[in-house]
Amino acid sequence: MSGQGSGGNVLAALASLFIPGLGQLLQGRFLMALIQFVLAGVLWFFLLGWLIHLWSILDAAKFKPEA
């Protein structure tokens, strides 16, 4: 049972805290991980990368796999 609030999601959110997209990668969501990693990298040049960073953390924490 791995849904919202599970230990796996907490670990994924913590991983995304350090590197945007890493939590999604741990959850097996490769495309979302790539999107968030690239967007964060690009937007950090405009000082807006923190937006993607926060999105990455929240997305990893709230992920609910489909049954």
Image (tube, rainbow, N blue to C red):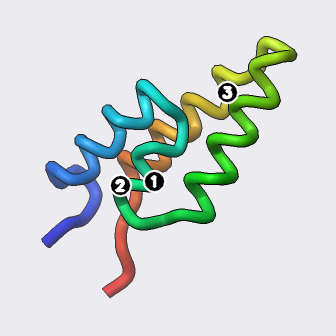
Residue at 58% over, 29% down: 53
Distance Cα–Cα, label 1 vs label 2: 5 Å
Can you tell which mark lies on residue 26? Answer: 2
* Identity of the residue drawn at 35% across and 39% down: 13
Q: Amino acid at mark 3?
A: Leu
SS class, disc 1: helix
For label 3, the residue is 51
Q: CA distance from mark 3 to mark 2?
A: 21 Å
Closer to us: 62 or 9: 9
Label whose residue precedes the other's in the sequence (3 or 2): 2
Callout 1–callout 2 Cβ contact below 8 Å: yes
- Whether residues under marks 3 and 1 lie with C-beta atoms below 8 angstroms apart, the answer is no
Left or right of 18 in this view: 47? right
Choose mark 3 or mark 2, whichever is in front: 2
Q: Label 2: how many residues lie within 10 Å, few (<14), some (14-19) or many (20+)?
A: some
Q: Secondary structure at mark 3?
A: helix
Label 1 sits on what residue type? Gln
| Amino acid type shown at disc 2 | Leu
Q: Would you call the spot at circle 1 few (<14 residues within 10 Å), some (14-19), or many (20 or more)?
A: many
Check disc 1 and report the residue beneath it.
24
Question: Which residue is at the front of the view, 35 or 10?
Answer: 35
Q: Position of residue 30 (x, y in %)?
A: 53, 63
Q: Quadrant of the C terminus?
A: bottom left
Label 3: how many Cα within 10 Å (few below 14, some 14–19, many 20+): few
Image quadrant assignment for residue 65: bottom left
